[in-house]
Amino acid sequence: MIAVPAVVAGASTAAARTDAPLFLFPQATLEPIAFDALPGWETDPIAPAFTAFRRSCARLRSRGDSVEPPRPMFSALRPVCRRALRLASHPSEHAARAFFQREFTPFLMTGVDQPQGFLTGYYEPEVEGSRTRTDIYATPLYRRPPDLVLEAPPKDGAPANKGKAFRREGDALVPYHDRAAIEDGALAGKGLEVAWIKDPADAFFAHIQGSVRVRLPDGAVLRLNYDGHNGQPYTPIGRLLIEQNLVPREKMSMDAIRAYIADHPQQGRELMRQNRSYIFFREATELKPGDGAIGAQGLPLTAIRSIAIDRTIHVYGTPFFIAADLPTGEDGAVAPFRHLTIAQDTGSAIIGPARADIFFGAGKEAGSIAGRIQHPGRFAIFLPRALDPARHRVPLPKPRPPSAPMTAATP
């Protein structure tokens, strides 16, 4: 394979500045690859990915890019989307596969000096709860406070999940309350509770996932979605458990974190409070019963097909073929993951060009699977055929050995 000199951000030479005023993907390298060299391409059911892509296209066509001037990838995707929207929303497998092969060219993507990408998983929790406080349901989930001032203002109604957040004290702006202050009552009595649930640990994991289904006593389901954050730093408590030798690295998972919190209530509470980040919710009344949680693009997510990416690098609607060996089988058995996915969400911990958080759906089983995923994987980004990477290049990094074929990395 021949490396495509495309994407090293921060080049300093005058020639680079003159030659390439635009670049495609910061801190990434690309190599062309044939569709038939993508492991699992011919057997992956493509129609669900096309349906997800078409949903993204409707948003991408009606809204501008988040930066000005628009990024080359954004501009190149729009005509592709026009053609996608002329097709049936649920095409045959043959038509869906033919569409992607006709419209895109796949390129292996890696970070500079990184041989492979990295994958995690997320899901939509489901918990029991109430709209009012009771003796059983006493842990609040809060809506966005009116005194929250976000450094990055909402775009198209969707608050950013990065950047600082403030509140006013007199004429000054001060950092917003952290998790400990909120749990100690900083927002109590202000009518901001959107729901009440049983377990503080469930509330904590709802904050991490960014959405939650609350099953009410009458059987109805309240869908809550991300609607802002407190601007405080996010600390992965799994990392703290490993650093303190409380859970071995090889056994770390969401289930292991939950088990530790359940077995050590006081220590678990203090552990959760070390993650100062806190998020707020809104009731997602627009969701239908079969819809997934709403991602940052403002669309319902599709299990296995929707991924969260680094929004500072990638454009929503971008297709990625991901190949990895992941513990998605029964009792955590490793199984091949070979799927076409669509960038429809983002997250504050998703940083880098070959980095994705895979949405696994809703409920306990999806949560168990998502919580086990911390694995390497191979990324193939699909570039519209009209987009020539060689036209948006800056000097390559120091030479690397030629890449291996796109085979999944072993965990």
Image: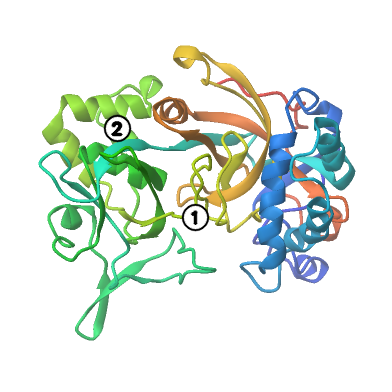
Quarter placement of the C terminus: top right
- What residue sits right under mark 1 in the picture? 286
Which mark, by number, is residue 131? none
Colouring style: rainbow
Q: Are marks 2 and 1 in contact (CB under 8 Å)?
A: no
Name the quarter where the N terminus is drawn: top right
- Can residue 246 be seen from the camera position used here? no
Q: Position of residue 369 (x, y in %)?
A: 46, 26
Q: Position of 31 compared to 349: left or right?
A: right
Return the residue nearer the eye: 351 or 147: 147
In which quadrant of the rendered view does residue 367 lie? top left
Given the image, on which type of amino acid does mark 2 rest? Glu
Q: Residues within 10 Å of mark 1 (few under 14, many from 20)?
A: few
Q: Nearer the viewer, residue 216 or 298?
A: 216
**Dot 2: few (<14), some (14–19), or many (≥20) neighbours within 10 Å?**
few
On the image, the x and y values in percent for residue 237 come to 30, 38
On the question of residue 160 being in view, the answer is yes
Q: Nearer the viewer, mark 2 or mark 1?
A: 1
Above or below residue 107? Residue 264 is above
Q: How many marks?
A: 2
For label 2, the SS is: helix
Residue at the image point whose x is 52% and y is 16% from the top: 329
Which residue is at 46% across, 62% downward?
A: 160
Q: Give the residue displayed 66% in from the left and 56% down from the top.
A: 315
Q: Is residue 205 left or right of residue 298?
A: left
Q: Indicate the position of residue 103 as horizontal and vertical percent values.
A: 86, 47
List x then y, in percent, for residue 260: 23, 26
Q: Which residue is mark 2?
A: 243
Q: Earlier in the sequence, mark 2 or mark 1?
A: 2
Asked where in the image residue 187 lies, by quadrant, the reply is bottom left
